[in-house]
Amino acid sequence: MRIESFKVDREALLAQTLAGAFPDQRGRFGPFGGRYVPETLVPALDRLQEGVSSILPDPAFRAELESELRTWVGRPTPLTFARELSRRWGAEVWLKREDLAHTGAHKINNAIGQALLAKRLGAKRIVAETGAGQHGVASAAACARLGLPCVVYMGAVDMERQAPNVGRMKLLGAQVVPVTGGDQTLRAAIDEALRDWVSDPDGTYYLLGSAVGPHPYPYMVREFQSVIGVEARAQMLEQAGALPDVTVACVGGGSNAIGLFHPFVRDLGVKLLGFEAGGTGTGLGQNAASLAYGRPGVLQGCYSLLLQDEHGQVQETHSVSAGLDYPGVGPEHALLATIGRVSYEAAEDGESLEALAECCEAEGILPAIESAHAFAGAKRHAKANPGSRILIGLSGRGDKDMPTLQRTLLKGVL
């Protein structure tokens, strides 16, 4: 990670992290986070912050959210012992099955939470962005559930490689708007959603899908996604009789990873490993691994680690996975990397696709390509640490990735 010149007191930041001090009142996770937005959005963010502070702790809101998570989303999701992968890898492998949540990924936890919040705040319409399509599908489903109009912005490149999810969003009643500017992927989709929100900050609610953006979004998304780690921690104690030695997740913007990691942060005996999109190499434009290769900067409302050139220009990225193809990362991940509480590495396209195929063959489970990066990383860790107890966040299922898999992994097989 290229943050050698970034001067911070890491021991003090670690102590504050373990004490639950972040984010602070300014929305900072240590030096990261904050708000860098147009003046027109400040009142909307202030209202949102007030709503988050008053509504999220409200017992009636918590009861409604928990009811939706239980009866509509299908929580708690199972913890599965991966018997054959354990045998092959020489480790004890457990899978937290977010692929079995309604709509097929972890994204629904945050989408239904924010949609309920938006309704209480009096929003008349919802806008959202999506990369792999899973957040778009989750947002469309949550809005249908609550009777809110939904517009989803999606890069034209991602619409092509995630065509099944485009159809799902439309069936769920959302308007899907193709984004043909910029890199035509997740970054460009977020830009367009922000422009829409700026045009009507009073009547529109921006349902941001990852732990990125201006405060209070990184905090709010973490709170809604932490149900993953809370469940997984309790399930490991019940089913395995102990906490994991290592907890592994894929990292794009970082919502599934922060949701899994956050309840384990104070368990210092549990190693936390995040795996980013290593793409095809280490050079700028060849990957989407901002924690491994990025430098501090501002993107889309917050200060974090970004993939940028020597002039500070944010660079286009590459990943076989649409959901990890983003040049930045959530500010809490930047903090956790800086203080060393989480170790972040890159998993390249090829090894991630191989891990996906192995999971299918060994366990009868088709993970999303995003999740396959975590499997590749977990296998790497198992080889270096025989006998370790590994918890993998299986963030989503891979049905949506069949067009990509047919062009890559299955080429010459079908």
Image (cartoon, rainbow, N blue to C red):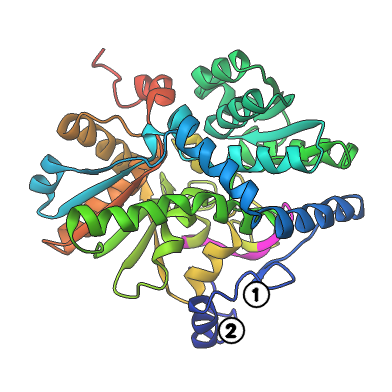
* Lower sequence index among marks 2 and 1: 2
Q: Residue at x 60, y 84 (%)?
A: 7
Could you say whether the residue bearing mark 2 is in a helix, strand or loop? loop
Q: Quadrant of residue 139?
A: top right
Q: Residue at x 42, y 33 (%)?
A: 74
- Left/right placement of residue 34 relative to residue 388 reads right
Could you say whether the residue bearing mark 1 is in a helix, strand or loop? loop
Tag count in the figure? 2
Q: Which residue is label 2 attached to?
A: 8
**Residue 177 against residue 85 in the figure, above or below:** above
Q: Which residue is label 1 attached to?
A: 31
- Residues 265 and 214: in front is 265
Question: Would you call the spot at circle 2 few (<14 residues within 10 Å), some (14-19), or many (20 or more)?
Answer: few
- Residues 189 and 281: in front is 189
Q: Quadrant of residue 350?
A: top left
**Residue 212 against residue 183 in the figure, above or below:** below
Q: Are marks 2 and 1 in contact (CB under 8 Å)?
A: yes
Image location of residue 101, percent across then percent down: 42, 34
Magenta span? 292-303
Image location of residue 66, percent across then percent down: 52, 43
Image location of residue 2, percent across then percent down: 52, 70
Q: Residue at x 52, y 31 (%)?
A: 134
- Residues 71 and 115: in front is 71
Image location of residue 87, percent across then percent down: 8, 46
**Residue 246 against residue 82 in the figure, above or below:** below
Q: Residue at x 59, y 41 (%)?
A: 64
The quadrant of the picture occupied by the C terminus is top left
The kind of residue tagged 1 is: Pro
